[in-house]
Amino acid sequence: MLKTRRLGAVLSIELDRPDRGNALSAELVERLIDGLEQASGDASLHTLVLTGSGRHFCTGFDLADLEQASDGDLLRRFVRIEQLLSLLWQAPMRTVCVARGRTWGAGADLLVACDRRLAADGASFRFPGPAFGVVLGSRRLAERIGVDRAREILGGGLELDTASALAAGLVQEICPADRLQERLAALAAAPLPDRETVFALRRATREDRSDADLAALVRSASRPGLKARLLAYRNIRLAARASSPG
């Protein structure tokens, strides 16, 4: 479910559910939270790299087994995802994300929460939460790319290709797949202040809005009918996939 690799002061965490597009199940989220908490407490680390195995980085919230879940179960899962994103946003180290294939929903939110955001050729980006009434990661996206552009993408359910994501500032560079490892090695070797200074810089340049972000998520996701909205969204996606050529 997760693969980790340590090389000097760099820790790589790979989401490893390729058969599910690395979608965020409840168990995967808990493992990511544990991994981030451990990494944040390890003073010998200066860089954390997030990647995904298979074709896609992360296709978002795992929509499997919705029938067995209650609104309360689903709300808790979204709360834990928001807490994961907050940990990543506030991490006392440099964070790097590599987007490949579909980087959608909570997967796109993981990307947004990282300092350095790379995309392989052919990556695509979507933030479908508003389609089922969930406000997750929206303020962080607005901080990255601007309020007007964020509202346009979120409200319109837009899908961005790599060029559009680069133009918007969602990603900072597009890197050919055969050069990703080389580029990651260069980033890991780049000079970086000590962790205490990195954390101080975060606090000086970024207001801690984690409580407000969590409150916004809970207000949206606790509205009655969360499960029904997710089921409707899943059915629309399945119908679209069945009708698409190939």
Image (spheres, helix red, strand yellow):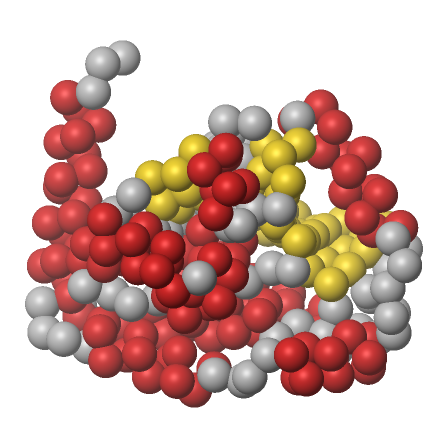
Could you tell me which residue is drawn at 54 percent across and 41 percent down? 166
Rendered location of residue 38, percent (x, y): 70, 72
Quadrant, the C terminus:
top left
Could you tell me which residue is drawn at 20 percent across and 38 percent down? 237
Q: Is residue 9 left or right of residue 54?
A: right
Q: Is residue 45 visible?
A: yes
Q: Is residue 20 visible?
A: no
Could you tell me which residue is drawn at 23 percent across and 55 percent down? 155
Rendered location of residue 68, percent (x, y): 19, 59
Q: Is residue 204 above or below residue 141?
A: below
Q: Is residue 180 above or below residue 29?
A: above
Could you tell me which residue is drawn at 54 percent across and 84 percent down? 208
Q: Is residue 50 above or below residue 99?
A: below
**Number of dots carrying numbers:** 0
Rendered location of residue 104, percent (x, y): 39, 46
Q: Is residue 46 left or right of residue 148?
A: right
Q: Is residue 212 above or below residue 119?
A: below
Rendered location of residue 151, percent (x, y): 30, 59
